[in-house]
Image (cartoon, helix red, strand yellow):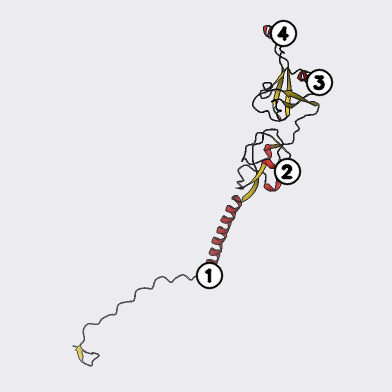
Amino acid sequence: MSSTVTRPDGAGAPAGPSVVAPAAPPRALTARRRRPALIGLSVALIAAGGLLGAFAVLTTGQHKAVVALAKPVAEGAVITDADLTEASITLDPAAIKPILAVNRDAVVGKRAANNLHAGALVTKEDLTDAPLIAAGQQLVGVLLKPGQLPSTPLTPGTAVLVVSTPGEDSAAAAAANAANAAPPFTMKAKVVRVGDPETTGNRTVDLAVAGTDGPALAARAATGRIAVIVAAKGQG
């Protein structure tokens, strides 16, 4: 038995087999409900991490004004304000610790503990307050001609030996000493100050010696028959 299906235009048409409408696809998993509080917390943590990173960079790479050398300063020399300048550097906690520029006045008047080079940063290890003239020592000024001291400039704090030299009128004595291999008379001393050269090239060198050696050195220096040589390390 056939059935008639009425079309929209009113005309009838034989009905065909029943058409089943396609099933709707299953809905995707219900989207998770957004949690505004968690999102806000995540954003806050990210921002805090960025701030901490920036703070670490600024802390480890902070620029500071520090004390530096404007010109060389020899070991033992007194540091003056004209010897100093300022430099801006990034402080590294693992590196050397230079003296800050705000403490510049504390550097002036100190003596260099070693040879300081122009451009070098000044640290506490570069400075000393130790006196060049120790307790019980005497200071003797010795006038020396070129050839009686090294051409290499002497600096305060340098250990030297004062050596007696034969005079022109004692050639026989010198020959006798050489034949007997007698060592020359020597005296330990330390340079305290080197005077400016005179027009003749002579200059006065202040030497610190043991209290018992002061008169003997003065007497030998008066004859002009002495020479100053730089002592080996540990000899001064």
Residue carrying label 1? 36
Nearest to the observer: residue 30 or residue 101: 101
Quarter-wise, where is residue 129 in the image? top right
Asked if labels 2 and 1 touch by Cβ distance under 8 angstroms, the answer is no
212 above or below 26?
Answer: above
At mark 1, the secondary structure is helix
Residue carrying label 4? 173
Is 114 on the left-hand or right-hand side of 131?
A: left
Which comes before the other along the chain, label 4 or label 1? 1
Q: Which numbered circle lies on residue 215?
A: 3
Residue lying at the far bottom in this picture: please name it.
Answer: 10
Is 90 on the left-hand or right-hand side of 105?
A: left
Q: Identity of the amino acid at label 2?
A: Ala
Point out residue 214 in the picture as x, y percentages from the top left corner: 80, 22
Nearest to the observer: residue 114 or residue 150: 150
CA distance separating discs 3 and 1 = 94 Å
CA distance separating discs 4 and 2 = 55 Å
Which comes before the other along the chain, label 3 or label 1? 1
Asked if labels 1 and 4 touch by Cβ distance under 8 angstroms, the answer is no
Viewer-side label of 4, 1:
4
Nearest to the observer: residue 47 or residue 90: 90
Q: Identity of the amino acid at label 4?
A: Ala
Quarter-wise, where is residue 157 in the image? top right
Residue carrying label 2? 106
Point out residue 61 in the picture as x, y percentages from the top left corner: 59, 50
